[in-house]
Image (cartoon, rainbow, N blue to C red):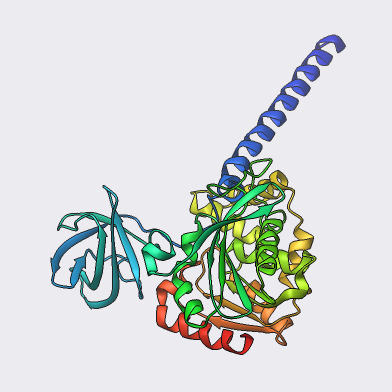
């Protein structure tokens, strides 16, 4: 083979290698982008409203009870809603009986639609629908906080105390996520603000359309803090779920009004963002290398500062009593990071575990226990 032919072959092989490498790179980018989509889009991830089940069949009904097909979802302890097509919604509580044929639970109420044998339902944490008045009979005012991107809708509930509670929902959810804790706040006389932030319905969109895991959203929580202080609050307790809890930690670390914070409550906080990104990608069907690519893509697309997130997870900026509520069985936010935080800052952190509970559905798993823990922890801060 002459030198000219060899050179031609080498050039073709080189070109083919470049094309193959480019194609492989494009595949990596596409897979990573798809695997990260739930994490970076406001309202999509990771798991802010807790688990929603697959279809469970209603087998039979009797006075105050309903029997479902036996599934892990129908056996979940605590208080849950079941939803079905045609906008149906009902609430069930403890398991009364279970065997291989089915699971019978107490039927608390049917809010919408009619349950009938043969109906396929989904278990969901959304026990309460509507607003504080329609769901709980609590008076509130619809108002807005002025954020840097525009007006942010807020539910304002009054109270006699000088300490206010600012409530920050997680992703895949909205302000309705805070409804279960409003009755205990009301009984304690604590005014409350249920906030929205960029990307929520009715709130300004994030400029790039992405969620930033609290690194930009904290400014919207700060706006709600300013609203509370402008309306007479002397101190503020920040309370967040899932990535909303991460946002609370960002607010406590960065806000110019952090001196007004007297307590923090974190429900299912996301403290290890790469691990949660991998787990959330797995929920969407991506595993192994694909899940790793999703975690890297989420970081790259949003520009999240993992070093700063690590500082938050270490509790370096915690200065006030902090109640952390978490499940050892959380499938989104590993409890390891939470336990490290509790060990490192045992001077201010009170960790309470909810074994068997799902991410951001701790109240559902044990409503009375959750409420009593919260009442006892809040009382000294009044």
Give the residue at the far right of this rendering: 3
Give the percent coordinates (x, y) of residue 15: 76, 21
Which residue shows up at 50% across the image and 59% down it?
A: 175
Q: Can you give x and y, in whole percent of width and height, for residue 198 in the image?
A: 63, 50
Residue at 57 percent of width and 41 percent of height: 34
Task: Please give the count of numbered marks on the rendered protein.
Answer: 0
Q: Residue at x 65, y 62 (%)?
A: 224
Q: In terms of depth relative to the viewer, which is nearer, 283 or 7?
A: 283
Residue 250: name its quadrant: bottom right
Residue 102 in the image: above or below residue 200:
below
* In the displayed structure image, the side of residue 22 where residue 376 appears, left or right: left
User: Residue 246 sits in which quadrant?
Assistant: bottom right
**Horizontal side of residue 76 vs 309, given as left or right:** left
Q: Quadrant of the C terminus?
A: bottom right
Rendering quarter of residue 63: bottom left
Residue 201 appears anywhere in the view: yes
Q: Is residue 128 visible?
A: no
Q: Residue at x 54, y 53 (%)?
A: 45
* Residue 359: x %, y % from top left: 50, 66
Whether residue 99 sits left or right of residue 161 in the image: it is: left
User: Up-down: is 301 above or below 257?
Assistant: above
Q: Which of the two residues, 71 or 119, is positioned nearer the viewer here? A: 119
Q: Quadrant of the N terminus?
A: top right
Left or right for 364, reference 21: left
Q: Which one is in front, 20 or 147?
A: 147
Q: Position of residue 31 (x, y in %)?
A: 59, 40
């Amino acid at each position: 083979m002459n030198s000219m032919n060899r050179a031609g072959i080498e050039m073709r092989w080189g070109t083919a290698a470049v094309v193959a490498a480019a194609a492989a790179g494009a595949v990596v980018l596409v897979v990573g982008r798809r695997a990260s989509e739930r994490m970076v889009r406001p309202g999509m991830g990771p798991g802010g409203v807790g688990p929603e089940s697959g279809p469970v069949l209603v087998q039979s009904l009797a006075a105050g009870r309903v029997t479902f097909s036996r599934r892990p979802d129908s056996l979940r302890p605590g208080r849950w809603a079941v939803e079905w097509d045609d906008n149906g919604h009902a609430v069930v509580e403890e398991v009364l009986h279970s065997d291989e044929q089915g699971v019978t639970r107490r039927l608390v109420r049917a809010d919408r639609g009619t349950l009938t044998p043969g109906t396929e339902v989904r278990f969901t944490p959304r026990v309460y629908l509507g607003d504080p008045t329609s769901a709980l009979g609590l008076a509130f005012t619809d108002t807005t906080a002025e954020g840097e991107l525009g007006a942010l809708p807020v539910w304002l509930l009054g109270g006699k105390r000088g300490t206010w509670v600012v409530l920050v929902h997680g992703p895949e959810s909205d302000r309705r996520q805070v409804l279960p804790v409003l009755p205990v706040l009301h009984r304690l006389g604590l005014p409350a603000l249920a906030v929205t932030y960029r990307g929520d319905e009715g709130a300004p969109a994030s400029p790039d359309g992405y969620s930033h895991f609290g690194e930009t959203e904290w400014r919207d929580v700060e706006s709600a803090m300013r609203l509370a202080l402008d309306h007479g609050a002397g101190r503020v307790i920040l309370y967040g779920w899932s990535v909303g809890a991460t946002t609370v930690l960002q607010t406590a670390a960065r806000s110019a009004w952090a001196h007004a914070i007297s307590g923090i409550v974190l429900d299912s906080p996301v403290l290890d963002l790469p691990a949660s990104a991998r787990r959330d990608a797995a929920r969407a069907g991506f595993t192994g290398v694909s899940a790793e690519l999703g975690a890297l893509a989420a970081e790259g697309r949003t520009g999240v500062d993992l070093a700063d997130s690590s500082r938050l997870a270490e509790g370096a900026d915690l200065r006030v009593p902090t109640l952390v509520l978490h499940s050892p069985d959380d499938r989104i936010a590993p409890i390891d990071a939470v336990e490290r935080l509790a060990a490192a800052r045992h001077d201010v952190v009170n960790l309470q575990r909810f074994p068997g509970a799902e991410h951001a559905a701790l109240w559902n798993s044990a409503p009375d226990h959750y409420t009593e823990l919260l009442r006892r922890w809040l009382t000294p801060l009044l």
